[in-house]
Structures are given as structure tokens and as C-alpha cells.
Amino acid sequence: MNRLPFLRLVSLTSPGIRVRINGVQKEVREEAKRKFMEFLERKDLRITNQRRVIIDTVFDTDEHFTAEQLLDWSRERDSSISRATVYRTLPLLTESNLVHEMDFGKPYKFYDPNYSDSPNHNHLICEDCEKIVEFDSEKIEEIEQEIGHNLGFTVKSQNLQLSATCNALKRSGACDNKPCN
Amino acid sequence: MNRLPFLRLVSLTSPGIRVRINGVQKEVREEAKRKFMEFLERKDLRITNQRRVIIDTVFDTDEHFTAEQLLDWSRERDSSISRATVYRTLPLLTESNLVHEMDFGKPYKFYDPNYSDSPNHNHLICEDCEKIVEFDSEKIEEIEQEIGHNLGFTVKSQNLQLSATCNALKRSGACDNKPCN
DNA sequence: ATAACTGCAAACTGTTTGCAAGCGA
DNA sequence: TCGCTTGCAAACAGTTTGCAGTTAT
């Protein structure tokens, strides 16, 4: 099953907006693995070989993935991993708050292994090449709180998706980031 | 199939934030119906009895609905309406930009018949009672454009979902809006 | 030992589709 | 009339689950 090429772009920092840097440090990823093991222990769940392989697969990548992609990648490491185990492990990963489940209106879900690193990041999706850029904005978070307050709610989490077209593509016929085939 | 009670709240206007008023005027709804008929004609599609019933059902309500709900409601008016026709009509409605398709992370989609009235509105979902509040914020739109610009994109559309808890519920044990069962 | 975990395959759910009959322009 | 539309039922895709055997603690 072929899926969309979801890449993360290199930072383009600007005031008040933090953009995820490509290639989060290895230590952060190792810490996430450790935290998930602790999460399992806390819930009296077992650290099986299959779970270890899946955890390593999840946190050794920086990319957003689908359940099916995770299955493929995990099977490259251990071909005995079953679809059921992947589907049973994903809810644990999201429950632990180390992975974020996302819906882009496709019939399948996407998972983001960078969540614990910056839990408030939002996404911009390029309509031209279907890439995803992550970004944080303090201003947006402020306004969200304000809106919630005005409506009589306490905002617990937000999900902002921007759908956009690539300026570079319009200028030169190709994205700066990657050719748009 | 029982679905969530998605209601629209009455306005709580505050500076810079426009909230949808409950009960959009009848004329707006009739205009939407007319526009959709025109859309069908423009595409050389036929105005069948089934389509008329579905259109009336969609624009006679103010609420967000699922495909299954639309089927139920339409069948109350004409019991011969089939699931297939509903599923075949929904893409036409979204393509016409009179209805907006939304994903709240559930396995089924929601549809918003208020879209043409305020195409940039966003949603706040109450975690306590699963109601949806619509709101517009010019500030958010400004920042979105700014972020897009800084990242080298032109933002075409946005989708902001706030997940929140109800302050009134916390104070008094019930929502102002509706008892939270 | 024993409770949690696994792979398998079947089940489930929302949505789509092929087909023969029906109906609008 | 002609070709778009319809209802039906089967197909489809992603996800979940029951079960019997396996494994971590």
C-alpha cells in the first residue's frame, strides 16, 4: 500500500514561531523509548520482544506514519510482527502521550512520534506536494485560551491544520524542499 | 445507530470573536438550496426527487450531521431514500462548497450545513458533553496568514479544533447549555 | 504458575460500487 | 428516447476481536 510522502521540513525560524528542526536528537528519542517502557511497567504490562521492536521503529523515525507503514517498518526488523500487535500497541503509544494520533481527513490515521517533544505543535499541509510542516506559535495558543475563556470553556488541547500552497513552487515551478512530482 | 448530540450554542459575542447565532435565517437556507440546484444544473446533473429531499433535509437543519443521520432524517420525509444515494449526494454537496466535511477523529465524518454562511469558522468541542461551538476569529486568521508567509506558503484554508472542558459544569455540576449526562 | 501477550483469521463499520431497472430533460 | 440516477447487495479498506497457543514475570 503506497502512502503519501510526509516529510518534515528544515527550520525557517521567525519571531514567535518555532518550527521543528529536522532530525531531532538521538537522546530525545532514546528518552521517549525509556519513558514508554516505564509507562508499560506502571500499567503492569509486559515488555515483549514485539513491543520492543515496534517502540524502536516508532522512535527511530522522525516522520509521521500510518498503522500500515509502522507494520511494514517493524516487519523489516522482525518479520513475525503481526498487524494485530501493531494495532494493539498504537493505542498504548497515544495513551502514554508520547505519540500523537492525527486525522487529516483520510480514511486512515496518522501518528506523530514527535509529540512529547513539542506537544502543542500544529501542522501545515502543502496542497502541492502533500508534505507536512510542523510549527509552534505562542500567539495562537494565547488566542485559543482567550477564545475558550470568552466562550466559557477551558481549552485543553488544540488542533490547527493549515492547508496551503507553496510559494516557491509558484515562482520557479518546484518546491524549495523537494521536487513536486 | 445512535450518534453524538451536536448542538449549536447561542451567541456569546466578544470583541474580535464572532460566534454563530443559533437558528440562521430561513432565507439563507433557501438560498443555499437554490444555489445547490444551480450547481447541479451547471454540471448537467438532474434534480431528482431523492436529491430534492436530501437537499431540503440538509438545509432545513442547523446542526452538524453524519451520513447515517442524514439518511435517517431524509427517510422520515421519503422512506425510499437509499443509503447509496445519500453517500452519492454528499460529495456533490461538499464540492459545491455549500456544505463542509469535517473530521473529528471519529471513524465517520461530520457535515456542516452552515459552511457557505461563514466559510472560515472554527470549532470548539466540549469534552464534557461533546457539543460543538462554532466561532470565527479574525486574529487567528491573521496569524495563520503570517505563519504561512513565514514558512513560504500561501494559506488556503484552515481547520482549528479546540478541545475544551466546560467552566459552568465545573462550577455548578451542569452545563449552562444543556445537562451533561 | 499464571496472567498477559501473540498471530491468525474472521468480524465489524463506514463507505463505495456494479448492475439492472427507473425516470428526468 | 437517452443517459443520468436509483436501490440493492456485494465489495472494499481500515480496524478490532475471539481464540488457542506462547511467553514474560
Image (tube, coloured by chain):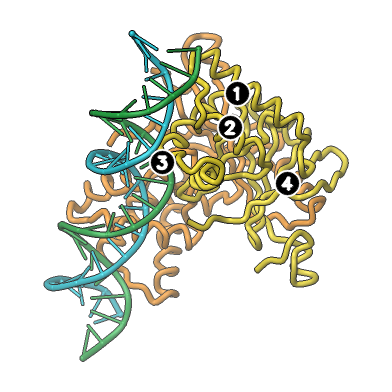
Chain colours: A orange, B yellow, C green, D cyan
On the image, which quarter does residue B141 sit in? top right
Real-space Cα separation, disc 2 to disc 4, in angstroms = 34 Å
* Local secondary structure at mark 1: helix
Looking at the rendered structure, whether the residues under marks 2 and 4 are on a common chain is answered as no
**Whether label 2 touches label 4, CB < 8 Å:** no
* Local secondary structure at mark 4: helix
Q: Nearer the viewer, mark 2 or mark 3?
A: 2
Q: Which residue is mark 2?
A: B55
Looking at the rendered structure, whether the residues under marks 1 and 4 are on a common chain is answered as no
Q: Which residue is mark 3?
A: A107
Mark before the other along the chain sequence, 4 or 3 = 3
For image coordinates 40% across by 74% down, the residue present is A41
Front-most of A31 and B100? B100
**Whether label 1 touches label 4, CB < 8 Å:** no
Q: Nearer the viewer, mark 1 or mark 3?
A: 1
Looking at the rendered structure, whether the residues under marks 4 and 3 are on a common chain is answered as yes
